Image (cartoon, rainbow, N blue to C red):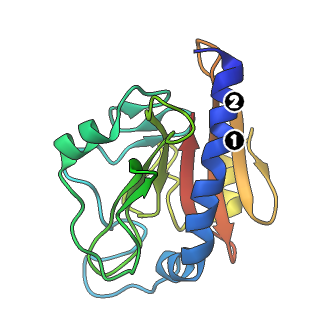
Amino acid sequence: MSPTVRESRVRWAIPLAALALTASAPALAGAAKAPHKGKGHHPARHGFALKGLSRTLVPQVGVGDIKLPSTLVPAQILKRFGRPGPTAAHLKTIVKVKGTIVSIAYYPRTTVRGITFNFHGPPVPDNQLNQISVTSPAYRTPQGLHVGSTPAQVRKALPQVRCDKFNCSLSGNTADGSVILTTFALFRGRVIQIIITG
């Protein structure tokens, strides 16, 4: 796939993640700063994690063994992890555009902290996975970053990031020249979402 085509797909993917982020930002910020509740529970160390997928999130690469760019399609994600369960968060767990699945979200029943797989969708015909979005603190980078980290922690762990009021981001190219982008979305001084797009 040419870098030009990949760049256009990255641009198509960003608005979808931003839309979901805007709708859930207050809830995510509250989750990221939630106080300690009971012995053995801390939001920065615990949280929803998808069974059968490693909790290691590698910036500019992917989560566990799911790496971007990817040829995975919605049917393969559903076959591996099953259909998302019901959620009280009032968010659709499977989103379709013109009958085509463009997003599959796995959340626990009572919060919006989980993991979402986004796909190209119309007008791109192949419908392959091109974005992974994490809102659960269970997923961590090798440097220890997670939902709930501060911008200062992100900058210290990843000196090459560029930060503003709303995001800390990394951009680059894969070995085949494809564009890949990692975004640490910020709200009230905390990371509330980590998005890898490629």
Disc marking residue 52: none
| x then y, percent, for residue 117 | 41, 48
Q: Where is residue 93 in the image (x, y as percent from the top left)?
A: 35, 64
**What residue is shown at x 50% (from left), y 58% (from top)?**
146
Report whether 107 appears left or right of 173.
Answer: left
Q: In this view, does 107 lie above or below 81?
A: below
Of residue 58 and residue 179, the one placed in the foreground of this image is 179
Rendered image quadrant of residue 79: top left
Is 65 situated left or right of 140 in this image? left
Left or right of residue 33: residue 64: left
Q: Report helix, strand or loop for mark 1.
A: helix
Farthest residue to the front: give it.
98
Q: Could you say where residue 123 lies in the image, as x and y percent from the top left?
A: 57, 38
Point 32% across, 41% down: residue:
74
Residue drawn at x 41%, y 64% as measured from the top left: 136
Q: Is mark 2 on a helix, strand or loop?
A: helix
Residue pictured at 46% horizontal, 56% vertical:
134
87 left or right, relative to 11? left
Structural distance between the alpha carbons of marks 2 and 1? 6 Å
* Image position of 85 with respect to 53: above or below: below
- Looking at numbered disc 2 in the image, what kind of residue is underneath it? Glu
Which residue corresponds to mark 2?
A: 7
The kind of residue on which mark 1 rests is Arg
Frontmost residue, 99 versus 39:
99
Marks 2/1 in contact by CB < 8 Å: the verdict is yes
Q: How many residues crowd around disc 1 within 10 Å: few (fewer than 14), some, or many (20 or more)?
A: few
User: Label 1, on which residue?
Assistant: 11
Is 176 drawn above or below residue 115 in the view shown?
Answer: above
